[in-house]
């Protein structure tokens, strides 16, 4: 039986407390209502977000050659390049030891000179082959002339031989000369073909030599470019955000270009990469006004506008977040890269509109507090959640409450716009209740401990 004693005692205590509370309320204790007065004002609805300040453009300056950092350049402030140094486009940031690259470039230049000499030699051979071809053509003309002469002589002696006026010796000599000159024509023609072939070979040699010159020039250009890469220059005007190397450090350029300096192009304009929840992204639009604050300047508000909504959302533990770029002016220079910003995106604004607090819209009285003359639908509304765009507020009539249905509009989370309803500026609506003689916001729990040691 002992195991039932403690539960029975607890039930008795709770039941006695509940009975005591109902007896006090039925004893005529008066409920005091807390009210607020409706008024017109300005309402701004916002969507919150957090983000990080970034320069508008960040240039990562690297090295395309490997070597030892020999020295740093000088910024526009006259000081060696370091964190925060201002630079112009073309400012020398650092120099890499260039001895090996200079030697390689000089070797390529020597190879180019050798290739150019071979071109000159090949062209000289072409000239010689052309001259030989011209001589062969001239020899052919001579051979043709001699052949023609010997042909005439042989024909004449051949005719005279029949009359017996020409000796056999003279006839044989004329015939031999004719045959020799005929063969000379063939030899001259062959010489022309041979010299023309030699001329073609010489011209091909010139083409090969000229191709070798082009290759050598490309090698010189490549080596001179690599030599130029030993001088690291800024390609934009801006400010050095980060210096990632020191003098004496060896830069290893492999598949990935090593990063040496990080340059912010223009710190007078900044952007905020803000994270916005997927439930709020539908209220964000381009050119939308944005207000934000940073911890470095408490109480100061900065302004900007939405520049871009990125589509590559991130999903972390089933929470989808979009990145929104917000552009802001930083001519004062107060905003620094990578500060944390707390943003408010201005969704919509109302001016001179009737406002009611969300506390009044959330208040639901007990059925015993509703005026008996009120409609059953209003009594039902006291225990139901209203549909979007609809609401109920309560006004006091004596010791009872009367429901006033309203149509709601824009809200900022604290106040809500009243679009329509039987209410006017200056009307008092109930936001809560307290037992008479108590300062509590709502009816107190009889079982809650009393602070301060006072008793009722």
Image (cartoon, rainbow, N blue to C red):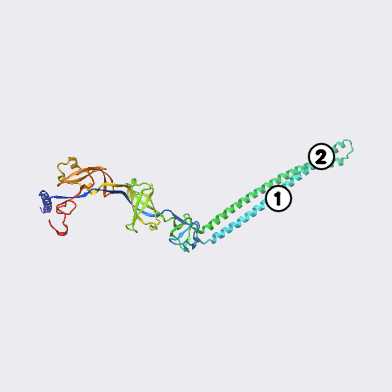
CA–CA distance in space, label 2 to label 1: 34 Å
- Say which residue label 1 marks: 128
Instruction: Give yes or no for contact between labels 2 and 1 (Cβ–Cβ under 8 Å).
Output: no
Q: Position of residue 49 (x, y in %)?
A: 33, 51
- Indicate the quadrant where residue 162 lies: top right
Q: Position of residue 137 (x, y in %)?
A: 74, 44
Q: What residue is shown at x 76% (from left), y 45% (from top)?
A: 139
Q: Position of residue 22 (x, y in %)?
A: 12, 49
Q: Nearer the viewer, residue 368 or 58?
A: 368
Q: Nearer the viewer, residue 143 or 59?
A: 59
Q: Position of residue 419 (x, y in %)?
A: 26, 43
Label for residue 13? none
Name the image quarter holding the C terminus.
Answer: bottom left
Count every numbered label the image shows and give the total.
2
Q: What residue is shown at x 19% (from left), y 42% (from top)?
A: 378
Label 1: few (<14), some (14–19) or many (≥20) C-alpha neighbours in 10 Å: some
- Say which residue label 2 marks: 151
Tell me: 422 left or right of 133. Answer: left
Q: What residue is shown at x 61% (from left), y 57% (from top)?
A: 110
Q: Nearer the viewer, residue 348 or 182?
A: 348
- Quick check: 320 above or below 295? above
State which mark lies toward you, 2 or 1: 1
Q: What residue is shown at x 38% (from left), y 55% (from top)?
A: 53
Tell me: 456 left or right of 141. Answer: left
Secondary structure at badge 2 equals: helix
Label 2: few (<14), some (14–19) or many (≥20) C-alpha neighbours in 10 Å: some
Secondary structure at badge 1 equals: helix
Q: Earlier in the sequence, mark 2 or mark 1?
A: 1
């Amino acid at each position: 039986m002992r195991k039932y004693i403690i539960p029975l005692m607890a039930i008795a205590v709770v039941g006695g407390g509940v009975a005591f509370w109902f007896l006090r309320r039925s004893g005529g204790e008066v409920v005091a209502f807390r009210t607020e007065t409706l008024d017109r004002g300005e309402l701004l609805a916002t969507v919150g977000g957090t983000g990080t300040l970034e320069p508008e453009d960040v240039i990562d300056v690297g090295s395309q050659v490997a070597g030892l950092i020999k020295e740093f350049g000088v910024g526009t402030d006259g000081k060696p390049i370091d964190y925060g140094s201002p630079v112009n486009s073309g400012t020398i940031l650092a120099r890499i030891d260039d001895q090996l690259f200079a030697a390689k470039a000089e070797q390529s230049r020597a190879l180019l000179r050798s290739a150019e000499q071979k071109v000159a030699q090949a062209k000289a051979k072409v000239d010689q082959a052309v001259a030989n071809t011209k001589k062969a053509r001239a020899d052919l003309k001579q051979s043709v002339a001699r052949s023609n002469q010997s042909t005439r002589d042989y024909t004449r002696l051949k005719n005279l031989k029949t009359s017996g006026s020409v000796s056999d010796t003279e006839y044989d000599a004329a015939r031999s000369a004719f045959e020799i000159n005929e063969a000379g024509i063939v030899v001259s023609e062959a010489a022309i073909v041979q010299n023309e072939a030699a001329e073609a070979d010489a011209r091909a040699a010139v083409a090969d030599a000229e191709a070798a010159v082009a290759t050598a020039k490309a090698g010189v250009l490549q080596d001179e470019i690599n030599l130029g890469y030993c001088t690291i220059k800024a390609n934009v005007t801006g400010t050095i955000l980060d210096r990632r190397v020191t003098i004496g450090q060896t830069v290893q350029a492999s598949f990935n270009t090593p990063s040496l300096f990080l340059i912010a192009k223009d710190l007078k304009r900044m952007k905020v990469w803000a994270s916005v929840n997927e439930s709020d992204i539908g209220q964000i639009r381009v050119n939308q006004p944005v207000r934000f604050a940073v911890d470095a300047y408490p109480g100061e508000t900065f302004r900007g506008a939405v520049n871009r909504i990125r589509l590559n959302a991130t999903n972390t533990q089933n929470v989808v977040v979009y990145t929104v770029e917000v552009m802001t002016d930083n001519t004062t220079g107060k905003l620094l890269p990578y500060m944390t910003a707390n943003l408010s995106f201005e969704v919509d604004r109302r001016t001179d509109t009737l406002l009611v607090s969300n506390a009044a819209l959330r208040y639901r009285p007990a059925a015993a507090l509703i005026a008996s003359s009120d409609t059953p639908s209003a009594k039902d509304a006291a225990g139901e959640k209203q549909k979007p765009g609809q609401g109920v507020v309560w006004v006091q009539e004596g010791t009872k409450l009367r429901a006033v249905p309203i149509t709601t509009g824009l809200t900022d989370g604290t106040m809500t716009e009243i679009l329509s309803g039987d209410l006017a500026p200056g009307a008092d609506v109930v936001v809560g209740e307290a037992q008479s003689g108590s300062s509590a916001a709502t009816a107190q729990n009889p079982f809650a401990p009393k602070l301060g040691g006072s008793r009722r």
